[in-house]
Image (cartoon, rainbow, N blue to C red):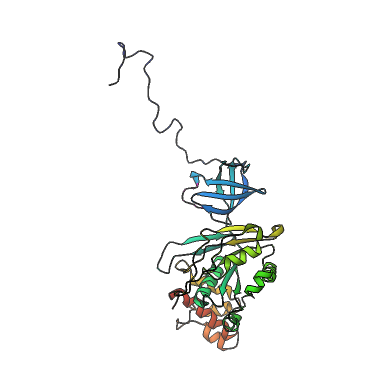
Amino acid sequence: MRRYGKNPDEDDIRFRPNPKGNRPRTHTRPKHEDAEEGMVLTVDRGRLTCLVDGRTVMAMKARELGRKAAVVGDTVSIVGDLSGDKDTLARIVRIGERRSVLRRTADDDDPFERVVVANADQLAIVTALADPEPRPRMIDRCLVAAYDGGLSPLLVLTKSDLASPDKLLEAYTPLGVPFIVTSREELENGDAAERVREQLHDRVTAFVGHSGVGKTTLVNALVPKDRRRTTGVVNAVTGRGRHTTTSALALPLPDYRGWVIDTPGVRSFGLHHIDPSRVIHAFPDLEPGTEGCPRGCTHDGHEPECALDAWVADGHADPARLDSLHRLLSTRERREGD
């Protein structure tokens, strides 16, 4: 029971302050003009490791950013303790505009897209020629995601000592996708890493692929001072590897001549978020032929009024290129493994 003195109007009565605080609510956000720019290297349970002026800084997202999340590759503005010392924690107050985005959904029925990497220039699609067997539909899906997100694709074929790359490359030659073929011996002696590194200079490259294809082994060869745990084990029944990379991580190439972003192995690559009309932009030789198409045409080969078929038949472009476009657009409608 609250007790008062004999005189309830005496001056020593204490009044409770506003339980929600004394400061009035405001929608005005601080400008943080003293914030320094950094790059997100990895994200782990709400803690973001960032590179700020050559120092590795641990940070967390400011409450004022709401639900907006930062991902690996993001350019961010950071305030607070930027010394990088142990047990220090800075605060991310702004996320910069993204020039490219690699996104995926869990499957084609999942409406919730996930941003995997931001601001990458290139997507390296790592595929083994054997053990496990290559999955062309998965490659097609990654290509569509790259074209949609503004990344240039690079096909990296591993384990050429176990199988020939000729049949697989025959399907992708019309697309004009650059490729590199490597073997286990070349990875061990460093020749493969040097050839791949030539394609990565001064670029930010995200690596994606199934578990067991040698993706992380290749990343370790490219950035030997920051080795990640690899799998090397492929299930004899399913032909799939076991996940060992659990989070995306950005690693600098020697002398900072580019960046490699290693991503966790994926079993599927959903394309629910993809707008098919944007994929045609990756085919500049075919795009002029869409001028005669009706509004909303998907150009997937199933539209009876699509003008591309007649335009290509008249000799304006290579029919193989149109077949490749149809294949990529239809892959969104097919389950991986079909």
Residue 119 pos. (x, y %)? 59, 59
Measured along the vertical axis of the image, is residue 141 above or below residue 203? below
Measured along the vertical axis of the image, is residue 202 above or below residue 139? above
Left or right of 131, for residue 257: right
Q: Main secondary structure of the magenta part?
A: loop
Left or right of 15, for residue 265: right
Residue 78 pos. (x, y %)? 59, 45
Please name the residue shown 43% across and 61% down the image. 112
User: Residue 286 appears in which quarter of the rendering?
Assistant: bottom right
Residue 126 pos. (x, y %)? 57, 71
User: Residue 71 appears in which quarter of the rendering?
Assistant: bottom right
Please name the residue shown 62% across and 63% down the image. 220
Question: Could you say which is closer to the camera, residue 318 or residue 234?
Answer: 234
Seen as rendered, the residue at the extreme left is 1
In which quadrant is the C terminus drawn?
A: bottom left
In reply to whether residue 67 is colored magenta, the answer given is yes
Please provide the residue range marked out in magenta.
65-69
Left or right of 83, for residue 67: left
